[in-house]
């Protein structure tokens, strides 16, 4: 976070000194404070979304669900682990059947946007193409 704050400060200073209108509306300190405040609010929002998503999944642990709303299973858990940086893409567990694929799709709808990284997107794409890998 320290590096992000430093980068935000540098970016804010560059924006401030290159924008005469901005310079007339506030001080450089005010602009830097606003930029850092926005960064922190964004991170808090992301962490809140992460917690809500993971608590929802945790509450389903140990249950068995075969309805259309199912969003947990080995393959969807694998994608979540990849999205959170806890598993490498090469170790992904692919869906075993269409029900498992449906769980992946349902999970993807709930996954916080900031977790839909390139590896997570590739993992979801791999899941969608699981029939080709068998």
Image: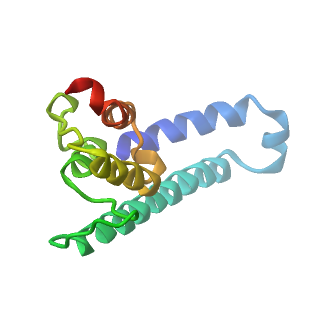
Residue 7 percent coordinates (x, y): 47, 36
Q: Residue at x 25, y 41 (%)?
A: 82
Picture residue at 19% right of the left edge, 36% below the top:
92
Q: What sort of colour scheme is used for the picture?
A: rainbow
In the image, is 34 to the left or to the right of 10? right
User: Does residue 98 lie above or below 58 as drawn?
Assistant: above
Q: Image point 63% across, 50% down: which residue?
A: 29
Q: Quadrant of residue 14?
A: top right
Nearest the eye: 46 or 52: 52
Spot the residue most to the top. Answer: 132
Q: Looking at the image, which is closer to me, 6 or 50?
A: 50
Residue 71 lies left or right of residue 5; in this view the side is left
Q: Position of residue 124 (x, y in %)?
A: 36, 37
Number of dots carrying numbers? 0
73 relative to 57, above or below: above
The answer to whether 34 appears left or right of 3 in the picture is right
Q: Quadrant of the C terminus?
A: top left
Establish if 120 lies above or below 25: above
Q: Position of residue 106 (x, y in %)?
A: 41, 55
Q: Residue at x 28, y 30 (%)?
A: 131
Q: Position of residue 117 (x, y in %)?
A: 39, 37
């Amino acid at each position: 976070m320290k590096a992000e704050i430093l980068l935000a400060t540098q970016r804010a200073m560059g924006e401030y000194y290159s924008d005469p209108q901005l310079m007339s509306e506030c001080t450089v300190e005010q602009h830097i404070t606003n930029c850092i405040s926005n960064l922190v609010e964004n991170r808090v929002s992301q962490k809140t979304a992460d917690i809500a998503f993971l608590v929802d999944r945790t509450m389903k642990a140990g249950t068995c669900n075969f309805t259309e709303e199912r969003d947990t299973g080995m393959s969807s858990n694998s994608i979540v682990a990849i999205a959170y940086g806890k598993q490498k893409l090469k170790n992904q567990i692919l869906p075993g059947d269409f029900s498992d694929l449906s769980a992946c799709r349902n999970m993807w709808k709930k996954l916080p946007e900031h977790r839909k990284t390139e590896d997570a997107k590739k993992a979801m794409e791999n899941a969608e193409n699981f029939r080709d890998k068998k």
